[in-house]
Amino acid sequence: MLVPIQTLIVDDSPRSRAGLRALLTTSPEVEVVGEAASGSEAVEQVAQHHPDAVLMDVRMPGMDGLAATRCIKKKWPQIRIVLLTMYDSYRQEAQAAGAEAYLIKGCSLDELIHALGTRD
């Protein structure tokens, strides 16, 4: 039996979060366990839900996705972080922060699932 990867969605746009949730819940490989609207809220949600993976926007007001990634990886290094953004210019910073994957918004569901670590 397939055990879905528990995923936290982090984006400051409610519309983006809703779209990602709708897309991800079409796959039995992913279970969305929570949402956050900022990096600091993401850290709180990770502490509460202990997801397997975090799908996070890079640019958000307050604590951005890069800072949140560093914080989460320091406390919970086993959690897989996928940064999802409209900008291709943060790849090196994402890698340095500890993100396992970096995707551009508009990528396919298969790309998202692969990045979250549910497929080889």
Image: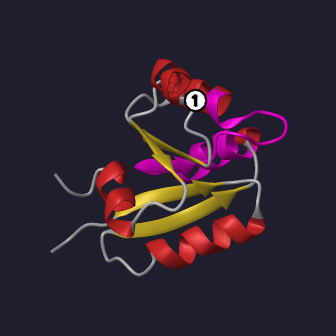
Q: Is residue 31 left or right of residue 89?
A: left
**At numbered mark 1, what does the secondary structure look like: helix, strand or loop?**
loop
Q: Is residue 119 left or right of residue 115?
A: left
Q: Which residue is mark 1?
A: 90
Q: Is residue 62 left or right of residue 93?
A: right
Q: Residue at x 42, y 28 (%)?
A: 77
Q: Residue furthest right?
A: 62
- Whether residue 69 is visible here, answered yes or no, is yes
Residue 39, percent across and down?
71, 40
Q: Residue furthest front?
A: 88
Q: Residue at x 36, y 52 (%)?
A: 116
Residue 67 forms part of the magenta stretch: no
Quadrant in the picture for residue 26: bottom left
Q: Residue at x 43, y 49 (%)?
A: 53
Residue 57, percent across and down?
63, 47
Q: How is the image coloured?
A: secondary structure
Number of labels in the image equals 1
- Whether residue 50 is visible here, answered yes or no, is no
Range of residues picked out in magenta = 41-66
Q: Residue furthest top?
A: 96
Residue 75, percent across and down?
53, 26
Location of the N terminus by quadrant is bottom left
Residue 81, percent across and down?
46, 40
Of residues 47 and 79, which is closer to you in this image?
A: 79
Q: Residue at x 66, y 66 (%)?
A: 17
Of residues 77 and 63, which is closer to you in this image?
A: 63
Residue type, mark 1 in image: Tyr
- Label 1 crowd bin: few (<14), some (14–19), many (20+), radius 10 Å: some
Q: Is residue 17 above or below residue 28?
A: above
Q: Is residue 57 left or right of residue 114?
A: right
Residue 45 forms part of the magenta stretch: yes
